Image (cartoon, grey):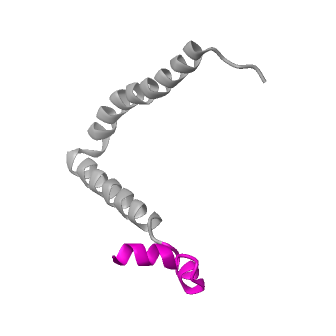
Amino acid sequence: MTARPLKVNFAINVLGAIIPLVVSLVTVPIYVRTIGNARYGIRAVQRSLLKTIASTASRRPSAANRSRGIVSDWLQRRTL
């Protein structure tokens, strides 16, 4: 396995952040023009709610783990 220089890794990381930004700046206005402002607003609310629900659900232990007592320490710390 060869080690890449730091400058190459830095450039890859910067491009990995810039390319999605450029793609969004090009495609979002086209998307809004196609579906309209109201529908785009509804989609934005839907996405934010889904992200909130997903992040909240991922922080809770599953019912199977709770019944087996695997996360009892976690539950005790949460109730204090």
Placement of 23 over or under 45, stated as above or below:
above
Total tally of numbered discs in the picture = 0
- Where is the N terminus found, in terms of image quarters? top right
- Relative placement, left or right, of 25 versus 36 is right
- Residue 25 lies, in percent from the top left, at 33, 28
Q: Position of residue 33 (x, y in %)?
A: 27, 37
Is 65 a magenta residue? Answer: yes
Quadrant hosting residue 4: top right
Q: Which residue is found at the position 53% from the left and 76% from the top?
A: 71
How far across and how far down the image is residue 58, in percent?
A: 47, 64
Q: What residue appears at the point 31 percent right and 55 percent down from the top-left corner?
A: 48
Quarter holding the C terminus is bottom left
Q: In the image, is residue 65 above or below residue 3?
A: below
Q: Main secondary structure of the magenta part?
A: helix
Residue at the far left in the pictured view: 38
Looking at the picture, tell me which residue is in the foreground, 56 or 37. Answer: 56
- Residue at image position (52%, 19%) is 10
39 and 15: which one is in front? 15
Q: Quadrant of residue 53?
A: bottom left
Q: Which residues are magenta?
A: 61-80
Question: Is residue 64 located in the magenta-colored stretch of the structure?
Answer: yes
Q: Is residue 22 above or below residue 63?
A: above
Q: Residue furthest bottom?
A: 67
Q: Nearer the viewer, residue 2 or 74?
A: 74
Q: Does residue 11 lie above or below 76 as drawn?
A: above
User: Residue 59 vs residue 33: left or right?
Assistant: right
x, y (%) of residue 65?
Answer: 57, 78
| Residue farthest right in this picture | 1
